[in-house]
Image (spheres, rainbow, N blue to C red):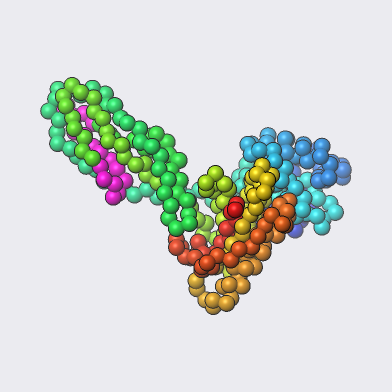
Amino acid sequence: MDEDWAIDVRKYVPDADSGVIAAIVRYCGIALRSRDSSLVSFTDATETDRVRENYLKKKLALTDPDSVLDSAIAAVGVRMKGDNTRNRVTVYYLLAEAFGKLGLFGAVAAAPVAPVMAAAPVMAAAPVMAAAIPAAVVAAPAGVAASSGHRRVAAGLTWGQKLPLVLMLLGGAGILYMVSKPKAVVAPVAVVAGAPVVAAPVAAPVVAVAIPEGAGIVREEVDAKPLVSVYFATSKTDVDAGIVPAAAEMKAYLDAHPGSALSVSGYADPRGDAAMNAELSKNRAFAVRDALIAAGIPTEAISLDKPADATDDTTSLTNGRRVDVRVK
């Protein structure tokens, strides 16, 4: 019965979605009819390969490298090491949760927060006195990345978002509108009748990484190295389930770069008692370190490094409730 599977799943995820559990039970189908096939053996390579190929790749449509997927499976196995059953439904639920794929089974996921783009000012040039203007030739601006504090800002925009020029023809006279992000300096465009219109290169708008308001994981890449920021709920040390694929990515990088290691640094928001905040940030760093070890990263490859200022609120109070894991 679905209720029996739900009891097992909720040993690990107390608020597990009943609809998702039922959907996973239906997906497993006849595999749940016998005890042997209803369990996952993490010591059987054939079994874990089957989970990777059939469940993670086909059902969840994951495209991560096999090393990342295998590490995620192993991390779930470590998480369930004290459980003699290791039920398939529970394993599949934990993997779907770790990769943010519960929505495939009907979970109501929070819509991703879209970057807030300020309204672009419109600058009208003088009317062009010409009967016709040929199609505009626009120089494509290069992508731009900037930084704010320690956070990386990505500029992965499409050409349509980068296009700084809209040419509108009204009757026999054209009005040229230049659209740019606030504070951008836009060079005027000279238009000569019968000649192509060339726009001066304009920097593309930059999009800041969204910081979760509570517990969550932000995975980035800085200088071609993975950077993972683990965010916590206020006064909590519980590590978000997204650490599983994030740790797998870190492990894959370490495996591919012998001699590299991880630095773990904990922060707290500046409110409240300073000594209490220092203890909290240390405990959060310990919790993240333990999660990395559970994912298969050697203990000796992880160091706990106290940051110069453990009360980081450069972006928001939420930004202070985090632990950074970076390659050093």
Q: Is residue 233 visible?
A: no
Q: Is residue 104 visible?
A: yes
Residue 130, image x and y in percent? 14, 25
Q: Quadrant of residue 176?
A: top left
Q: Magenta stretch: give its range.
A: 168-186
Image: 199 above or below 227 = above
Q: Quadrant of residue 325?
A: bottom right
Q: Is residue 138 left or right of residue 314?
A: left
Q: Is residue 195 left or right of residue 254?
A: left
Q: Residue at x 81, y 39 (%)?
A: 45
Image: 180 above or below 174 = below
Q: What is the residue that sits farthest to the front in this orientation? A: 259
Residue 294, image x and y in percent? 73, 55
Q: Residue at x 63, y 54 (%)?
A: 262
Q: Residue at x 67, y 64 (%)?
A: 286
Q: Residue at x 61, y 72 (%)?
A: 279
* Total numbered labels: 0
Q: Is residue 327 left or right of residue 76?
A: left
Residue nearest the observer in this picture, 283 or 213: 283
Residue nearest the observer in this picture, 139 or 75: 139
Image: 275 above or below 26 = below
Asked if the magenta segment contains residue 13, the reply would be no
Residue nearest the observer in this picture, 266 or 24: 266
Residue 290, image x and y in percent? 70, 60
Q: Quadrant of residue 192?
A: top left
Residue nearest the observer in this picture, 178 or 7: 178
Residue 177, image x and y in percent? 23, 37
Asked if the magenta segment contains residue 176, the reply would be yes
